[in-house]
Image (cartoon, helix red, strand yellow):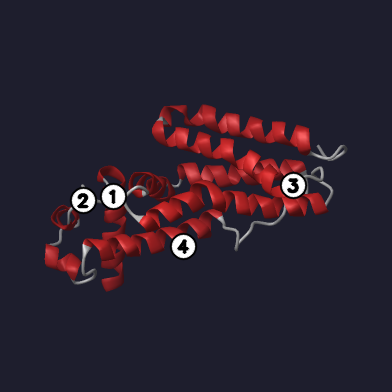
Amino acid sequence: MANDTKERILEAALEMFSQNGYAGTNIRELSASLGLVKSGVYKHYESKEAIWNALLDQMIAYYADRFGSADRLPPVPDSPEDLTRLTMRMVNVTVHDKKIAMTRKVLTLEQFRDPRARELATKHFLTGLTDMFTRIFTGMMEKALLKKDDPAMLAFAYTAPISALIHLCDREPEKTDGAMAQIEAFSRHFISIYGEAGHE
């Protein structure tokens, strides 16, 4: 029961932080949204900062479980078409999973206030994706599916426009379908340039 309450507190905190930011969220409103008194929240978390840090810990685990990480790579694609399928699966998760979308909003809002949020924003919006695809592209080059090139530079060139389009989905949700189509078209265009002949 206590674990259920702790989880409910974190879910409500994520929603409030994503809408109002850290500074704009207070424990009284958070408690009220859960039908609790403030002491009911403080029974589980000693402060708003404790809720924030527990939420960041949960975000890291949740994101890695559903999206992957440099330490938990998806299998190296067996064909260029598999790269597009893998990319679209990952993009679908990151755009349509409500918790991941709210996490992205929280990190965007709080990266200038909180050093840990800044570090996570850099990892999730840039370095983590680049590291993951560097290793994927290295594996694809070893399988002769991609032309030999600098895998880190290719990973950066591949992930940067995809990340930009994901952020567009956050800012302007009505453009999501168009952005998803553009990501798929970009993946196929990338393969047409860097795929090895006979594997495109």
Q: What element carries label 4?
A: helix
Between residues 18 and 116, which one lies in front from this camera angle?
Answer: 116
Question: Residue at image x 71%, y 31%?
Answer: 189
The first of marks 1 and 3 along the sequence is: 1
**Residue 83 x/y as whole percent:** 70, 44
The first of marks 3 and 4 along the sequence is: 4
The residue carrying pointer 3 sits among few (fewer than 14), some (14 to 19) or many (20 or more) residues within 10 Å by Cα, namely few
Image quadrant in which you'd find residue 9? bottom left
Residue 198 in the figure: left or right of residue 7: right
Tell me if I can see residue 1 in this picture: no
**Residue 76 x/y as whole percent:** 72, 54
Tell whether label 4 touches label 3 (CB within 8 Å). no
Which residue is identified by label 4? 61
Which residue is identified by label 3? 150
Marking on residue 130? none
Q: Distance between the residues labelled 4 and 1?
A: 18 Å
Q: Which of marks 3 and 4 is in front?
A: 3
Which amino acid is tagged 4?
A: Ala
User: Where is the N terminus found, in terms of image quarters?
Assistant: bottom left
Q: How far apart are marks 1 and 2 (CA)?
A: 6 Å
The first of marks 3 and 2 along the sequence is: 2
Marking on residue 17? 1
Which amino acid is tagged 3?
A: Asp
Which amino acid is tagged 1?
A: Phe
